[in-house]
Image (spheres, rainbow, N blue to C red):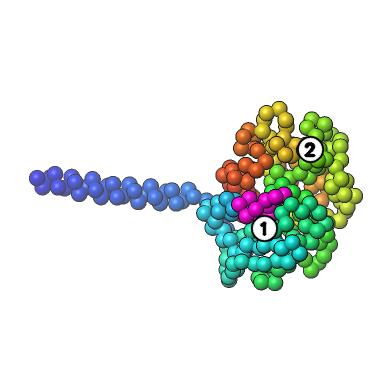
Amino acid sequence: MKNIKKIAVFLTISSILVLVVYGALSYLKKPSYAYNPVPTFYFHGYSGTKNSTASMIAYAQKNYGATKVFTARVGSDGGVTLDGDWGADIDKPLIQVVLDDNTNADMDLLAVWYANVIDKVRREHAFDSYNTVAHSMGNSALQYLLLKEGANEDFPKLSKEVALAAPINGVIGLDDQLHENYLEANGYPKIISGNYAYYLDQINNFPKNQIDILNIYGNLDDGTDSDGSVTTVSAKSLKYLASKYAKSYQEVEIKGEDGQHSKLHENSQVDKMICSFLWQEKE
């Protein structure tokens, strides 16, 4: 009987030790990301809402130690209301931007609104640089913002830019058509949209060697060479622009159903790419 009890105790202790060791190894294998106080602004696209960026923000908070500090709501008059608080020593602060007039396609005006958001947040908590994650049309407005404020020494500097489903050179059915455009060997698009022509004309006004860009685009792999709203050629047209001003550029294609235009911001694979790009692991 004593031997049986000894064996039972031994097995119990052994099981506990196995669990402890397993837990410790799992913890050691889990990436640890360095403290980073640079804020990241999340911009939705045309007709987007709070839900458009909610899951990306939730993923960053759950898996990377980020903290949503503000929801910045932009009224139809361009006024900005902040809901939340950015306390001291917050790691990886996130700002979710929501436009009340979410179908406004005036890029010059949207650029002013974006600048209003960044300036409003900066007045609450000072910062010199910022990151962005923009979906769809939000990327076009961001390009206009860069041209508007790029040379302004008093405005914070964009450090890392994530372009998601970016219609940099047109939208299907508006200023782009399926299978009509293509990229030349140097990445220059054969057909130029109105917005893209403006970017080219103003290319020297983009901030030079300052921005690291990650361009994530979708391809339904159904023969359309698009995500359903933006052709791969339109999205990949960003590469030629970036070659003229960006510090670095990389692009990733998401193929299949998960590459659909709106599903790109509901994709854990994409979430992980974004977070890994924005925040570096501890060495």
Seen in the picture, residue 121 relative to 209 is either above or below; the reply is below
The residue under label 1 is 98
x, y (%) of residue 2? 10, 47
- Is 259 displayed left or right of 187 in the figure? left
Residue drawn where x is 54% and y is 56% of the image: 61
Residue drawn where x is 73% and y is 66% of the image: 79
What secondary structure do most residues of the magenta stretch adopt?
loop
Q: Nearer the viewer, residue 276 or 49?
A: 49
Quadrant housing the N terminus: top left
Looking at this rendering, what residue extends furthest in the top direction?
Answer: 223
Instruction: Please identify the quarter of the rendering in which residue 218 is found.
Output: top right
- Is 264 displayed left or right of 204 in the figure? left
The residue under label 2 is 173
What amino acid does circle 1 point to? Val
Residue drawn where x is 81% and y is 40% of the image: 174
Residue drawn where x is 59% and y is 69% of the image: 85
Q: Nearer the viewer, residue 276 or 132?
A: 132
Label 2 Cα neighbours within 10 Å, binned few <14 / some 14-19 / many ≥20: few
Q: Is residue 223 magenta?
A: no
Would you say residue 47 is visible in this rendering? yes
Instruction: Please identify the quarter of the rendering in which residue 176 is found.
Output: top right
Label 1 Cα neighbours within 10 Å, binned few <14 / some 14-19 / many ≥20: many
Q: Which of the two discs, 2 and 1, labels the residue nearer the N terminus?
A: 1
Task: Check disc 1 and report its element: helix, strand or loop.
Answer: strand
Q: Which residues are magenta?
A: 38-52
